[in-house]
Amino acid sequence: MAEARLRFGAKSFADVKLFLTGPGEEKYGTNPVYLHSQILKKLKCFEGEFSNCWSPYKSTEIRVTTSHNFDHYLKCIEIMYGEHVYFPNVEECLAILSVASEMFADECINKCMQYLEAVSWSAEEESQIRKVLSSEGLKLKILPDLAARLHQDDDGDHINFVEKIIQEMMLYYKSRSCSLSRNRETAEKDLRGMLEGNTSRDVVDVCGRVVLEEFKASIGSRQLSTLKLPFNLIQLCDGGILEAALKAFCEDAEFVKYVKEEYCRPYSTRSSSTDEAVFDIIMWFMKAAGGGKIIVPRASRVSFLTTWLPIVGIFRCHSSIRNKFEELDKAVLKVVESLPQVDQKRICLLWGEVYR
């Protein structure tokens, strides 16, 4: 019988019925699975099922109890048919790889490794890949290309190069030139991709560091119109970057003074977009502190509220911001609820001033 005519799960020419059962006697929903002995003989785990007296003209029933996910188990067999199997993600591929190792399904093992070598990984995924491949119980022989990718001597040069690239991207990102608007959008998209995608941990760290420095620079130079640009990216960073950004935003006394003076000017002479940018940053920090996204000490929470609550009241004259005050109240309440009563009374007095 030509193997090219064989199809996984098809009754045509099938001479094996596979019945799958879980360790708790649960049965696979589509038992039996129709298979072909020519394929199963390639798997060492089925060698004992086909004795010398086995006849190709008689259907054989095989009953297997497995602790593995039924679909993962069957995918290993499906790959042995030479059919293309789609791995939806690294996690599932590693699960199938573990099953394939126990089944001695070499073709499936190689397919899994080829997939892992060809896709991008997050730091967490890379750690899991290393853990599975180094497992003594599996005893896997890693394909050369995958081994080469896992074995990287980090001399730091590539990070210095990446940092220079990110700094150049930030120059486009904050440019006010209309002719560079497309570059700004591209830079923002690329930087966001570094922070949100399957980028290595060291690249994410350097990206976070660069955008934090850009945020601090905007505070230091009082560039209110550019504050929100790097801050949009900082929101995607880890707690350490977020805490550093909050500290920079709240503890620069000269910056706070400048903002107060800026918003004491008549509304008609101010930029509404600047109003909204500063307000949105204040709002985000309120939510992050109240929701536990960043851990803010009591003294810093009180300082943040007493510094910025008196200022946000000025934004009421901006219609698009005025509509956000209900959302602001909820965010402030979360922070206030986390404080001792003595602090709550003090903050509530300031809070009431916002609406007078």
Image (spheres, grey):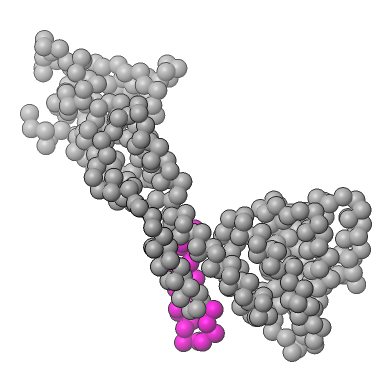
Residue depicted at x 81% and y 57%:
299
Name the residue at 46% across, 62% down.
193
**Name of the residue lying farthest toward the front:** 155
Give the percent coordinates (x, y) of residue 216: 63, 72
Whether residue 7 sits left or right of residue 245 in the image: it is: left
Whether 164 is drawn above or below 124: the answer is below
Residue 169 colored in magenta in the image: no
Quadrant that contains the N terminus: top left
Q: Give residue 329's quadrant in the image.
A: bottom right
Labels in figure, total: 0
Q: Nearer the viewer, residue 305 or 210?
A: 210
| Residue reaching furthest to the bottom | 269
- Percent across and percent down for residue 181 are 48, 81
Left or right: 64 with respect to 243?
left
**Quadrant of residue 325 in the image?**
bottom right
The image shows residue 6 at horizontal and vertical percentages of 15, 33
Task: Point out the stretch of residues depicted in magenta.
Answer: 174-197
Asked whether residue 192 is drawn in magenta, I would say yes
Q: Residue at x 11, y 17 (%)?
A: 57
Q: Find the residue positioned furthest to the top.
A: 53
Side of 143 relative to 54 (left or right): right
Q: Is residue 262 above or below residue 72?
A: below
Residue 246 seen in the current view? yes
Q: Quick one: 13 or 97, which is closer to the camera?
A: 97
As drawn, 341 above or below 107? below
Q: Quadrant of the C terminus?
A: bottom right
> Is residue 329 visible from the viewing direction of this image?
no
What secondary structure is the magenta-colored segment mainly? helix
